[in-house]
């Protein structure tokens, strides 16, 4: 993902270790898993549904790539442009996940609701034991129960529809979805994008052109243009033939200017910052030079959940640093901060630990 690097604010030249800085922008690695395609009926094992849903277990958020031009059907086969309604793809993905989660809830529901009734065990804790392998937290479960308007104390009175309502809210809380509306340059795609935004106002739907991003990246690699992911324009560096120049100008006029970029980097950024609500924090060892013990300036950037505290950063750097935490300094202000101080985006922190 891409952020404007804090080195601009501090007026220093960074030397990154775990990321890359280009023209004042830092690109921080995130793990993206390209999973098997999903088809209607995946929760029943159709297509590669089982593989997809197993992969889904490890996901914190989903980027749903939709052919917004309607030139690919629900099973991934090419069709005549506009022949397929891409809004159906958005609907069936969320339904498949909902059915999958509901099926998991139903498996052990009898045991769970009896425990709640007989021992007054906390329902959210019991559900967490069942769902923790799906990267669903107890907080996710608590919020889902509230939004589904389900009373945990009356779990024995719930019907099958209640579990499905809970599954829907669990999906929203634990597997938030962003839509990458790809092939936005194809005729008819813009109208489909408008319809999608009207029908699914709860989703972030980003117009994208993966083909344009690939073309720009390749041109940059060959030294023909100056371009980095997320830019809204490019600079010509070397001579090229008329065909290449015409293709690049088409991208500039019809994609970059119109949508402020190809959308690919924008999707990743919004997934990290808006869906997962992460902030970037920079740990350093020398608060005056903003460097590590080797003199590397702003060497690392950590992505932490919003609301994280100084002690959370200490543990993120190394478990021993967290365990032996003594104090910390805000390198920007040079003021001492305690372990329970909440971190802000682009904070630069020096941590003191025993040993």
Image: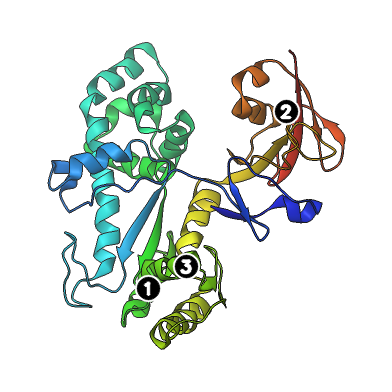
Position of 91 relative to 278 (above/below):
below
Q: Is residue 198 left or right of residue 49?
A: right
The residue that disc 2 covers is 340
Label 1, residues with CA under 10 Å away: few <14, some 14-19, many ≥20? many
Reading the chain from its start, which is encountered first: label 2 or label 3? 3
Occupied quadrant, residue 212 = bottom left
The residue that disc 1 covers is 193
C-alpha gap between disc 1 and disc 3 = 33 Å
Occupied quadrant, residue 355 = top right
C-alpha gap between disc 2 and disc 3 = 49 Å
Q: Secondary structure at mark 2?
A: loop
* Residue 222: mark: 3
Q: Secondary structure at mark 1?
A: helix
Reading the chain from its start, which is encountered first: label 1 or label 3? 1
Position of 58 relative to 229 (above/below):
above
Residue at image point 63% right, 17% down? 320
Label 3, residues with CA under 10 Å away: few <14, some 14-19, many ≥20? few
- Residue 260: image x %, image y %? 53, 73
Foreground pick, 193 / 200: 193
């Amino acid at each position: 993902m891409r952020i404007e690097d804090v080195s601009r604010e501090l007026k220093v030249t960074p030397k990154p270790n775990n990321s890359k800085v280009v023209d004042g922008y830092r690109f921080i690695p995130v793990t993206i898993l390209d999973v098997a395609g999903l088809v209607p009926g995946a929760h029943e094992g159709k297509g590669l549904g089982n593989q997809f849903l197993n992969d889904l277990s490890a996901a914190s958020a989903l980027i749903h790539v939709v052919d917004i031009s309607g030139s690919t059907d629900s099973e991934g086969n090419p069709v005549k442009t506009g022949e397929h309604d891409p809004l159906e793809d958005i609907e069936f993905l969320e339904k498949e996940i909902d059915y999958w989660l509901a099926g998991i809830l139903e498996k052990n529901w009898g045991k769970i609701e009896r425990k709640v009734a007989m021992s007054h065990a906390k329902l959210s804790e019991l559900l967490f034991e069942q769902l923790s392998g799906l990267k669903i937290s107890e907080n996710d479960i608590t919020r889902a129960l509230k939004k589904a308007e389900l009373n945990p104390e009356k779990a024995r009175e719930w019907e099958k529809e209640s579990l499905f309502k809970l599954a829907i809210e669990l999906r929203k809380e634990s597997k938030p979805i962003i839509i990458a509306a790809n092939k936005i340059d194809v005729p008819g795609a813009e109208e489909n994008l408008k319809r999608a935004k009207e029908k699914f106002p709860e989703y972030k739907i980003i117009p994208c052109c993966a083909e344009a991003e690939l073309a720009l990246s390749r041109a940059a690699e060959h030294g023909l243009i100056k371009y980095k992911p997320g830019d809204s324009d490019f600079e010509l560096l070397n001579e090229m033939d008329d065909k290449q120049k015409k293709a690049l100008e088409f991208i500039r006029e019809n994609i970059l200017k119109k949508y402020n970029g190809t959308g690919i980097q924008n999707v990743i950024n919004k997934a990290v910052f808006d869906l997962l609500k992460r902030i970037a924090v920079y740990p350093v060892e020398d608060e005056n030079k903003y460097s590590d013990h080797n003199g590397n300036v702003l060497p690392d950037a950590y992505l932490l959940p919003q609301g994280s505290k100084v002690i959370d950063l200490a543990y993120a750097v190394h478990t021993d640093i967290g365990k032996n935490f003594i104090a910390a300094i805000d390198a920007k202000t040079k003021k001492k901060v305690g372990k329970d101080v909440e971190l802000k985006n682009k904070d630069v922190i020096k941590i003191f630990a025993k040993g």
